[in-house]
């Protein structure tokens, strides 16, 4: 029996724990797109180093866990055009929504933020529409 769902659960728990820890330590909401955006546009100011440490943890943890969990299949396509299109759609959607799934979905829903809940519902619907279009109509995934 296939049990890939467990990896999503573990990933969700890690993201939720990271969001709670970030809020407890820094008193701010963890939104990955906001963290990256503030580093790119130079508005991070005094929080630059804490944001860099956070991003280093996001990058390093999977590398550190790889020897233990080598057989995880992320189900990522080999089609470069699909990956680029997905990245652009996520980036544009993040800018339009003023945040990403970590800020709205994890932190917003846990705070019962109406804005976060609405944004997350829109993300989920857009993802479902994307799967229907790319996989079922175009057959490129």
Image (cartoon, grey):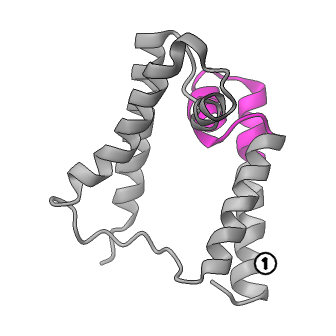
41 lies above or below 101: above
Residue occupying the point 70% across, 55% down: 90
Return the residue found at the far bottom: 139
Residue occupying the point 72% across, 51% down: 91
The question of residue 112 being in magenta is answered with: yes
- Disc 1 is placed on an element classified as helix
29 lies above or below 76: above
The residue lying toward the viewer, choosing from 29 and 136, is: 29
State left or right for residue 81 relative to residue 15: right
Return the residue found at the far right: 96
Picture coordinates of residue 126 (x, y %)?
A: 77, 59
Q: Quadrant of residue 44?
A: top right
**Which residue range is magenta in the image?**
97-122
Picture coordinates of residue 72 (x, y %)?
A: 31, 68
The residue lying toward the viewer, choosing from 78 and 101, is: 78
The residue lying toward the viewer, choosing from 18 and 5, is: 18
State left or right for residue 52 relative to residue 133: left
Q: Quadrant of residue 88?
A: bottom right
State left or right for residue 43 relative to residue 35: right
Residue occupying the point 50% across, 74% down: 76
- Secondary structure mostly seen in magenta is helix
The residue lying toward the viewer, choosing from 120 and 83, is: 83
Report which residue position mark 1 lands on.
Answer: 133
59 lies above or below 132: above
Residue occupying the point 67% across, 21% down: 43
């Amino acid at each position: 029996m296939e049990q890939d769902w467990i990896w999503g659960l573990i990933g969700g728990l890690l993201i939720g724990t990271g969001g709670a820890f970030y809020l407890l330590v820094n008193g701010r909401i963890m939104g990955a797109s906001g963290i990256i955006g503030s580093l790119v546009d130079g508005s991070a100011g005094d929080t630059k180093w804490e944001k860099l440490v956070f991003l280093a943890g996001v990058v390093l943890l999977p590398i550190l866990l790889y020897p233990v969990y080598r057989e995880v299949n992320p189900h990522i396509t080999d089609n470069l055009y699909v990956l680029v299109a997905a990245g652009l759609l996520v980036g544009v959607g993040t800018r339009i929504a003023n945040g990403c799934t970590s800020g709205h979905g994890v932190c917003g829903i846990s705070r019962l933020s109406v804005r976060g809940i609405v944004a997350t519902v829109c993300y989920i619907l857009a993802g479902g529409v994307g799967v229907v279009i790319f996989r079922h109509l175009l057959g490129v995934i």
